[in-house]
Amino acid sequence: MKELAVVITEMINQFHDAFISICGLLGIQLTDKEMHFWVIGIFGIFFFAVTHAVFTWLSKWSLTALSFIYTVTIIIVIVFAIEIQQKVTGRGNMEFLDATEGLKGFLVFFVIFLLLKMLLRLIRYFFSGGAVSKGNGNTRSRK
């Protein structure tokens, strides 16, 4: 975990130095706060556009997939926050394997959730004579 944090920090530092050099060559003087404004702003809007396009496509296919992606993102943030907190406070060891085991735990429980969801759909399918709706169980059409 410590090695990963060092690698990420080094990559960020290299980008930071390159960005400052490019701005210097162009005669642009930015404070650190202004640089963060532009870099994170541009990266954020690009990432939003890609995410929005993917989520729009996924929403037509599966709401479960959207929920999974959101949950995994939050779980990753929480797992790494816990590992960083352990390093800062000295309560536990900051290890990459701890983070991966936590994520693996979520994935195992998610697979169990999917299996139960599929089992429930199969049960509904057999007891409804083969007509299973994706909604709330109603097979009548609305006017």
Image (cartoon, rainbow, N blue to C red):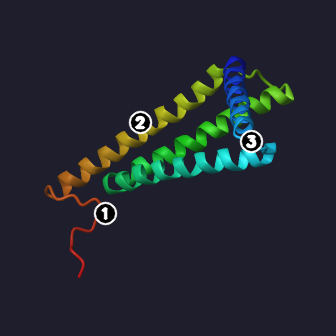
Above or below, comparing residue 69 to residue 139 in the picture = above
- Give the amino acid at mark 2: Val
- Give the amino acid at mark 3: Gly
Q: CA distance from mark 3 to mark 1?
A: 59 Å
On the image, the x and y values in percent for residue 53 come to 41, 52
Q: Earlier in the sequence, mark 3 or mark 2?
A: 3
Instruction: State the residue position of label 3.
Output: 27
Point 73% across, 28% down: residue:
13
Q: CA distance from mark 3 to mark 2?
A: 54 Å
**Disc 2 packing (10 Å; few <14; some 14–19; many ≥20):** few
Point 37% across, 43% down: residue:
116
- Front-most of residues 46 and 18: 18
| Left or right, residue 124 beside residue 4 | left
Q: Secondary structure at mark 1?
A: loop
On the image, the x and y values in percent for residue 118 come to 31, 44
Q: Secondary structure at mark 2?
A: helix
In the rendered structure, find residue 111 and report the number of the disc placed on it: 2
Foreground: disc 3 or disc 2: 3
Point 67% across, 21% down: residue:
7
Q: Earlier in the sequence, mark 1 or mark 2?
A: 2
Point 73% across, 29% down: residue:
17
Q: CA distance from mark 1 to mark 2?
A: 21 Å
- Give the amino acid at mark 1: Gly
Above or below, comparing residue 74 to residue 103 in the picture = below
On the image, the x and y values in percent for residue 25 come to 71, 35
Q: Quadrant of residue 15?
A: top right
| Left or right, residue 74 beside residue 143 | right
| Left or right, residue 136 beside residue 128 | right
Above or below, comparing residue 9 to residue 49 in the picture = above
Instruction: State the residue position of label 1.
Output: 135
On the image, the x and y values in percent for residue 143 come to 23, 82
